[in-house]
Image (cartoon, helix red, strand yellow):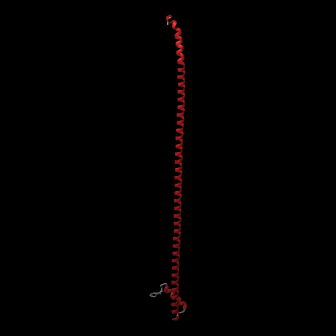
Amino acid sequence: MDDSYEHRADDARLAIKATIEKLEPLYRQAVQREEEQAELERLRAEAAKREQEERDARIRAEAEERARLRAEEAAKREIEEARQKQLEAERAAERAAQEERERIERERAESARKAEAEAAEESRRKAALEHRAKIHKEIKQSFVDSGVPPELAVEVINLIKADKIAHVIIEY
């Protein structure tokens, strides 16, 4: 500026001072607004972080709960499967025991049948022997009654039994 405006220098200084006085509160307000905005952004960021952490915690808790429920279900299935296997094993053991009882009963019945058959065969054989002995006794007595000595009668009977005498047989 040249000297022509020197008389206005005081006015200019006053105007600058007045402008500074008007702008300083506005500046302080702007700075305060920026600080408040920054604080608001920081609070929002903290809130967002908290919300994310809460979401993450909720998701983790839900995942843990699902895992727990799956584990419980798996454990229940395993218990049920084990129970079913135990029931099947018990049924199989009962069937095996029943089959064994039936086998033993069949063997007893077969053994009794064989014993009965053997007893009947023994009885028949004994009766046949007794019948033969009776026939032999009657034949011997007939020879003795005819005058043949008893020892000779026994010898003749033994020869007839051995099929040593032609055309002569003993009918029992």
**Residue 107: percent from the left, percent from the top?**
52, 71
- State the residue in front, 131 or 23: 23
Who's the residue at 53% across and 79% down the image? Answer: 119
- Tell me if residue 50 comes above or below residue 126 in the rendering: above
Judging depth in this view, the residue of 157 and 10 nearest the camera is: 10
- The number of numbered badges drawn on the structure is 0
Q: Which residue is at the far left? A: 167
Q: Position of residue 90 (x, y in %)?
A: 53, 61
Residue 37 vertical placement versus 150 (above, below)? above
Image coordinates for residue 25, horizontal then vertical, percent: 54, 20
User: Going 54% across and 38% down the picture, which residue do you hit?
Assistant: 54
Q: Which residue is situated farthest in the top direction here?
A: 3
Q: Residue at x 52, y 62 (%)?
A: 91
Q: Which x, y percent locates residue 162?
A: 49, 84
The foreground one among 18 and 49 is 18
The answer to whether residue 80 is above or below residue 131 is above
Q: Which of 126 and 57 lies nearest the eye of the viewer? A: 57
